[in-house]
Image (tube, helix red, strand yellow):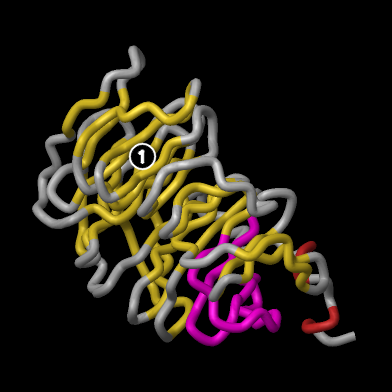
Amino acid sequence: MSDEDISLTEKRVYAGGDGATAAFVASAIGLARVAVSDDIVGEFSLDHRGDTTAVAADGGHLAIGTPEDVFIGTDDGFYGIDFGAATAVGYRDGLVASGGERVARYDGGWETVAEIDGVRAIDDGMVAAESGVYRLDGTHVGLDDVRDVSGSGTPLAATGDGLYALANGWVRALDGAFRCVSSDGERAHAATRETLYERSDDGEWTAVDLPVDGAVVDVAYGGDGTYAVTEAGVFLADVGDGWRHRSIGLSGVSGMAIV
């Protein structure tokens, strides 16, 4: 049996053994792996070459979207799984991807679950699209011009006119042209091109004082660490003692995931 015959949904990626957190950064150049120990940003390498439009991880699994296909990452490399061009990938009861109007779930093959135009991001069962927020079955749940969404805990949406939280309907938390939002159910961050915001324990959003300039395009969490990356490829890490950073030499960064 060849490696390609093994069920890719059962393969776990980059198990490693050095105790470092593995962050994967998607960019126009390719997918970079960044090793982070506490808040020390260590070695980085390019694990997949070519324009990478999206990246997602869940439970030790990793997937990326590209203009050619969706790829699963394993210890042995990346394998295309015959989806075609993808603008968004995510995990909810397995791998989900979108390209064009198609939203589909992978389980040894692709099953279309919805038709949604202009999908920009998928997170934990929520879909961000040009025409609003959707559930994976295609149900529209409001808003417009949604650039990013977080489905962990209280759903959050980054739109062209503000940051919104789903309560009894969508409630605007902040004004501005937001481009990304992230949450692990407890911590939450969101960013405009100019400013990164953090949600405090009492639910208030405050601006974060970063040690570098540049637009933050994604935030992710791993253990006690909070990690951010800018469009120009500056990687930042904070484990409670302030932000440390390092340029990883990428351009056109589109997202990040923590394995």
Q: How many marks?
A: 1
Verify whether residue 72 appears in magenta.
yes
How many neighbours does mark 1 have within 10 angstroms: few (below 14), some (14-19), or many (20 or more)?
many
In the image, taking residue 214 as reference, residue 199 lies left or right, namely right
In the image, taking residue 89 as reference, residue 110 lies left or right, namely right
Q: Is residue 94 above or below residue 250?
A: above
> Residue visible at 40% across and 41% down?
157
Verify whether residue 77 appears in magenta.
yes
> Residue visible at 36% across and 34% down?
164
**Amino acid of disc 1:** Thr
Q: Residue furthest right?
A: 1
* Quarter of the image where one finds residue 86: bottom right
The residues colored magenta run 60-89
Give residue 18's position: percent from left, percent from top: 51, 54
Considering the image in quadrants, where does the N terminus appear?
bottom right
Give residue 235's position: percent from left, percent from top: 27, 56
The residue pinned by badge 1 equals: 226
For the residue pair 114 and 249, the one nearer the viewer reads as 114
Give residue 28's position: percent from left, percent from top: 33, 79
For the residue pair 41 and 252, the one nearer the viewer reads as 252
